[in-house]
């Protein structure tokens, strides 16, 4: 996770774990895209 | 786990175990150079003290030199180096002096926490140009000016944490807020304040895009609704003027402020330590 908006009232370590989970899942999806399309640039630019 | 699964995220109003001092290796901040603006009181003071407690070399900066000096006195008990430097963040020359004095005394800046700022509530139709832009200059121009001065060195060294005290820009805790909503809520009587804080959030988002290939990180932090925040009575005194010209403003704002959560300044202070500790790294290579 790069810099972002942080709400100090919420448990940051818990949120960061949550973000890691989501990002890892998104990366998995993106890797599938990369595999099926072969578009590496597309993969890098997707959010 | 499904990304749509609901996870209970605890909400706090004061420092909590996950970010408290006991989480950090004693050497995490040893020798690190930390600059805190607005260190004379409130969130800035608490943040400067927290970093000092963690072993950092802390620059206490504020336009109120006496308050700043007093805060640094409190840090003496931690036995770590401090520097007091007066700076009005609306003046670029003074910000340049702050950076130069820091580099000369301690070396390049590793962490900067931009806590200098204040709130002001008025009715735009009767607002005065000096008051309106004065707030935006303090809350938005100050942090961005400082950033421009230290960023080249951070990029060159591939390290640095920039922490901007922003705001939820909301008075209702019933509204769920995430990073996509932050800074876009509309509230009467807070045009300048909302612009300044929303601006910081957008600044961080855009800046971080420029920093994608580096390990420099920027964060816009909603500190919680901290009691005792300076409201329009520090530099650009408008309270009496607004009271006279638009009494509905203080009445409305007063009710809102009375009804919101009252967070301790320790919460954003130790959140800043947590963000600067390196624990918030990019997990995706």
Image: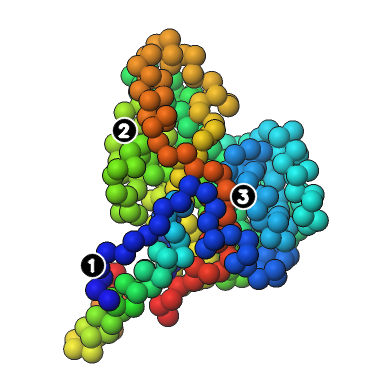
> Which label was assigned to residue B4?
1
Chain hosting mark 1 = B
Residue identifier under label 3: B47
Q: Residues within 10 Å of mark 1 (few under 14, many from 20)?
A: few
Residue found at x 46% / y 28%: B120
Rendered location of residue B211, percent (x, y): 46, 66
The image shows residue B25, relative to residue B236, as above or below, that is below
Whichever of labels 1 and 2 marks the residue nearer the N terminus, that label is: 1
> Which label was assigned to residue B187?
2
Secondary element under disc 2, as helix, strand or loop, is loop
Check if mark 2 and mark 3 are on a common chain: yes
Secondary element under disc 1, as helix, strand or loop, is loop
Rendered location of residue B144, percent (x, y): 51, 48
**Between tags 1 and 3, which lies in front?**
1
Chain hosting mark 2 = B
The image shows residue B54, relative to residue A26, as above or below, that is above
The image shows residue A24, relative to residue B46, as above or below, that is below
Asked whether residue B121 appears in the rendered view, the answer is yes
Rendered location of residue B149, percent (x, y): 60, 53
Total residue callouts: 3
**Between tags 2 and 3, which lies in front?**
3
Distance between mark 2 and mark 3 Cα atoms: 28 Å
Q: Which quadrant holds residue B43?
A: top right
């Amino acid at each position: 996770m790069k810099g972002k908006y942080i709400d100090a009232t919420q448990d940051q370590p818990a949120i960061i774990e949550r973000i890691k989970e989501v990002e890892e899942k998104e990366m998995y999806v993106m890797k599938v895209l990369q595999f099926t399309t072969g578009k590496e640039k597309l993969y890098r630019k997707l959010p | 786990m499904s990304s749509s699964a609901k996870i209970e995220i605890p909400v706090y109003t004061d420092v909590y175990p996950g970010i408290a001092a006991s989480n950090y290796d004693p050497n995490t901040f040893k020798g690190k150079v930390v600059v805190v603006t607005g260190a004379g009181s409130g969130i800035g003071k608490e943040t400067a003290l927290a970093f000092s407690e963690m072993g950092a070399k802390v620059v206490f900066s504020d336009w109120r030199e006496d308050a700043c000096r007093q805060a640094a006195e409190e840090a003496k008990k931690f036995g770590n180096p401090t520097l007091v430097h007066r700076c009005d963040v609306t003046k670029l020359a003074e910000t340049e002096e702050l950076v130069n004095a820091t580099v000369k005394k301690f070396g390049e800046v590793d962490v900067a926490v931009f806590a200098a700022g204040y709130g002001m509530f008025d009715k735009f139709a009767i607002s005065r140009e000096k008051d309106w832009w004065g707030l935006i200059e303090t809350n938005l121009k100050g942090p961005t000016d400082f950033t421009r001065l230290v960023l080249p060195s951070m990029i060159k060294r591939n390290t640095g944490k920039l922490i901007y005290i922003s705001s939820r820009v909301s008075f209702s805790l019933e509204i769920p807020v995430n990073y996509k909503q932050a800074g876009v809520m509309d509230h009467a009587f807070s045009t300048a304040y909302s612009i300044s804080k929303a601006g910081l959030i957008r600044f961080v988002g855009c800046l971080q895009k420029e920093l994608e290939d580096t390990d420099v990180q920027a964060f816009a932090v909603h500190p919680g609704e901290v009691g005792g925040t300076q409201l329009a009575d520090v530099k650009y005194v408008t309270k009496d003027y607004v009271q006279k010209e638009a009494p509905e403003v203080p009445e409305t704002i007063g009710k809102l402020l009375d009804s919101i959560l009252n967070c301790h300044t320790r919460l954003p202070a130790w959140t800043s330590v947590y963000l600067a500790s390196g624990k918030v790294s990019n997990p995706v290579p």
